[in-house]
Amino acid sequence: HSGVRAWLARWGWLRSLGASHSYGLFRQMSVQRRELVIFERHPAPGSGEAGEWFELALPFKPGPVDRQPPRIPSLHMPRLDWLLWFAALRMASDQSLELQRQLGVGPMAAAPDWLRELLRGLEAREPSVVALLAGDA
């Protein structure tokens, strides 16, 4: 198609000037959305025994399709949700999973340090960390 050829010719000319380029972060899009899900166990009411596991909700994480989407006050994705998305991509990449299998370790071996600190803060119930989550964490 001549229109496509003309566009490609212009694109090549712009690239030769260094006036355009592909944006590296999203140069290759994933076809799956891998997510980290954080659970905590709440004691059974009236006893000190371990009770049920509950998923901790993130305020801006995609959720059930019947739920109204969260309102994001700007065009930027909230930082924690963004970091968790990239941590999941890193920890569950084919290369990472193969290395984990070879070493006989679990996914937390590939977890970034900030994620370990987040989980430690949640376990310690640090108010500044708990405040990052929605609902009754």
Image (cartoon, rainbow, N blue to C red):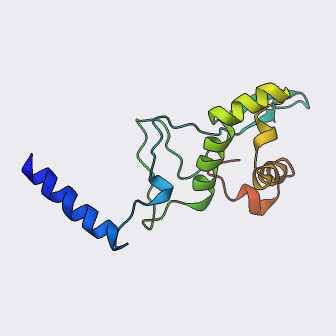
Where is residue 75? Give x, y as percent: 42, 65
Whole-percent x, y for residue 23 in the image: 43, 60
- Toward the left, the furthest residue is 2
The residue lying toward the viewer, choosing from 66 and 111, is 111
Q: How many marks?
A: 0
Q: Residue at x 78, y 31 (%)?
A: 100
Q: Nearer the viewer, residue 115 or 42?
A: 115
The correct choice, above or below, for 1 with respect to 41 in the image is below
| 102 lies above or below 91 | above
Q: Is residue 72 above or below residue 122?
A: below
Which percent across, then down, holds residue 104? 85, 26
The residue depicted at 62 percent of the width and 51 percent of the height is: 134
Residue at 55 percent across and 60 percent down: it is 78
Determine whether, in the image, residue 120 is placed left or right of residue 65.
right
Would residue 75 be found to the left or right of residue 136 on screen?
A: left
In what quadrant of the picture does the N terminus appear? top left
